[in-house]
Amino acid sequence: MKFQNNIEQRLTGRYNKSFAFVGNVKDKTILDVGCSFGWFEKWAIENNCKRIIGIEPSEVDVKYLKDAIPNATFISGSALCVPYENDYFEILVMWEVLEHLPKNSENISFQEIYRVLKPGGYLFLSTPNRTFWSCSLDPAWWLVGHRHYNINELKEKLEDSGFEIINIEYGGRFYELISMILLYIFKWCFKSEMPFKSWFDKKRDAEFLDGAGFTNVFLKVRKSLSLN
């Protein structure tokens, strides 16, 4: 089967874990920084959010997203300079984005996120977890220096930016790592889906939803209710 970059084909365990981790979005105003192909926007709209805005750096991607998911708002922007006023959003999500920012710019991004969240608002984020296996079996870690983070450095950066840590969870194990290796090979070498994709997807779902993984870390943090 030819590789398809659409929501139906790309939804896997990590995305389903993200939905469960966020939970209720009804009547919430949400910003998705680094919205990829709009998978979270589609889910949030289906679950009755008040409004969701997705940010992507590429104007080409933004144009595609506007056509694909017309009920969401998409703009070109960056996690380092969020084009919204202070205290605007109740929820902000940033899935697998932090590791793609320029090195040592994480605190700038967290400070921008803190600025645009309402007091008491929540940031939900995920990023690759730094362990021996998650790094060793990540081709991008070897080829392009794909960053992985340990929980202590994430907590330090978030707390330095003013956030309170509310919840930390993990997901993904060896089926996730093997699937990503196969994805890279078959997508880039053969422009096709990997073999046994449906079978791997079921295994990946289980790895992310049972709460016992190690490949990715998920954090829920809160902006202080106090403006002082």
Image: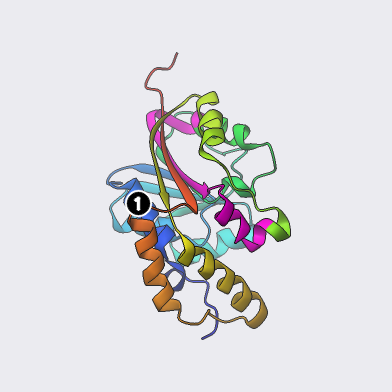
Label 1 belongs to which residue? 211
Q: Nearer the viewer, residue 44 or 135?
A: 135
Mark 1: secondary structure: loop
Is residue 60 shown above or below 5? Answer: above
Q: Residue at x 45, y 81 (%)?
A: 196
Q: Residue at x 35, y 48 (%)?
A: 21
Q: Residue at x 43, y 41 (%)?
A: 219
Is residue 85 among the parts visible in the rendering? no
Q: Nearer the viewer, residue 136 or 184?
A: 136
What percent of the width, then of the height, locates residue 17? 37, 55
Is residue 97 shown above or below 181? Answer: above
Left/right placement of residue 29 relative to residue 31 reads left
List the single residue furthest toward the top: 228
What percent of the width, then of the height, locates residue 159? 50, 26
Label 1: how many residues lie within 10 Å, few (<14), some (14-19) or many (20+)?
A: few
Q: Residue at x 43, y 17 (%)?
A: 227
Question: In which quadrant is the C terminus drawn?
Answer: top left
Mark 1 residue type: Gly
Magenta range is 114-141
Q: Nearer the viewer, residue 165 or 68?
A: 165
Is residue 22 shown above or below 186? Answer: above
Based on the picture, tell me whether residue 118 belongs to the magenta stretch: yes
Is residue 153 among the parts visible in the rendering? yes
What percent of the width, then of the height, locates residue 199? 40, 77
Count the labels in the image: 1
Based on the picture, tell me whether residue 128 belongs to the magenta stretch: yes
Left/right placement of residue 130 relative to residue 118 reads right
Left/right placement of residue 210 relative to residue 76 reads left
What percent of the width, then of the height, locates residue 137? 60, 61
